[in-house]
Amino acid sequence: MAVADFAFPLDRPRPCGGYWPSHWPAECGGNRRQKAAVGRLDARSGTAAVTTRSTGRWDVMVVTREPGEWYVGGTMPAFTGPPPHGWVERFDPVTLEALAVSPALPCGDHVWCGAILVHRNGCVYSVNGSYLHRLDPIDLHIESERALVDCSHNGLLALSDGTLVTKDLRLEGQGPTTVSRFDPETLEPVGDPIVLPEGSMGRIAADVDPFGVEHVYVPGAEHLLRLRVEPAGLVLDDFQPRYRTPASEQGLAWDACLSGDAVWVMDNGDVPSVRHIHTTFPNGRFDDPPFLSWRQPVPWRGPQRLLRAGADGKVREVAPFGTPGGGIIAPPVVVPERRIAIAWDSVNGGLAGVAIDEMDVRWQLDVRPRMQPVVFPDSGELVTNDFCDGVDWLVVVDVETGELLDRVDTGSRIANGMFLTAGLERDVYYCSTLTLARVAWH
């Protein structure tokens, strides 16, 4: 291994050099996926105002470039009927109205949530289905296009040298995952793609260690894998802690969060709706669409687990709820400044705060999260969702005590596990199928 111990920096003061210098240029706010916002929310002392826009699309994530330049990207919820496509939109950050919209972006007919980012060269990049696009940041015309491995892709990162990394999504038994790296100007490959020894479902994370060595972390079907970034390509190294076995009563891990002194994941992510989408080809295209609710019973008995992999490769775990058949569709949140990790169970319900040193449960809250949350470490607040009685609520929770500080109706009636993004004015942007929203506290 390159280092004797992990000491992952914070995304906020030490972002990756591959991005435009905004506070949220990529999904989860940075390559370490810490989902941590600048400043304070202070929801308890404010009143929430909601702006909601019905888009008719699958809204995935929001990123920002210059002040006032905000982008949302996603795909079409076209599980049947006319071919799907990806899209990116620049929108007014207050009214949410569209200011510019990209052409329909080819996606290889795969229906899955991709990713967008704002590169240090100023361009907006989108990965959707089996295509990568470079877009002009003003009118969003296509500057360059690259066909990828013919499979849906999950996640897109800019590394410290500006190169782009993405990977396809493979469930257990569907063959190995391919991780690809591209030049941001030409979209030509940088080195050969690396084929991993197992499939990977979750999105990638990355970090540069104290010796200047950059690594990409990939949650596999059995192991947490790590790739070393070299000038000529990506190399699989020996950090490969096992978090499950094929015979286990647990599901696959989603994205990793690099925080504090560990790599953190939650398992039980390949819930029936995910399996339905990725056992058809093109992914997510059906003659007769199945029932895709994330509330369906899962095909394993194991409870929802939060897993911590240290530098020694040992994995510690905690099952905060202990309820059989747990399931999620998002990575955990870890707040090292508060020594708390946040885990949840989307299938059975429940949100929990876990002490990251002792790995014991400090509090639990009866809500049903599904989204990629946002944390405000300075004020100790977590923002996530609670889908209840056909309404997708935003909830604000004290990360140290679990106290429910606020509860806001987003106007959305579908909860599909997409991303929250922190604004700079005590506000949060919300993405879901058919709905884009902004919640601001005044």
Image (cartoon, helix red, strand yellow):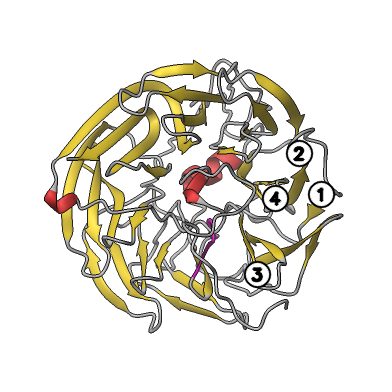
Q: Position of residue 403 (x, y in %)?
A: 17, 63
Residue at the spot of label 3: 209
Which segment did they paint magenta? 253-259
Task: Judge from the rendering whether residue 346 lies leftward or rightward of residue 216; answer left or right.
Answer: left
Residue at the spot of label 2: 149
Residue at the spot of label 1: 193
> Which sits earlier in the primary sequence, circle 1 or circle 4?
4
Q: Residue at x 23, y 49 (%)?
A: 395
Assess disc 2: are there few (<14), some (14-19) or many (≥20) residues with their C-alpha within 10 Å of its C-alpha.
some
Res 140 visible = yes
* Amino acid beneath label 2: Val
Residue 255 on the magenta span: yes
* Amino acid beneath label 1: Pro
Q: Nearer the viewer, mark 4 or mark 3?
A: 3
Q: How far, Cα to Cα, is label 2 from label 1? A: 10 Å
Q: Nearer the viewer, mark 4 or mark 2?
A: 2
Secondary structure, mark 3, is loop
> Which sits earlier in the primary sequence, circle 4 or circle 2?
2
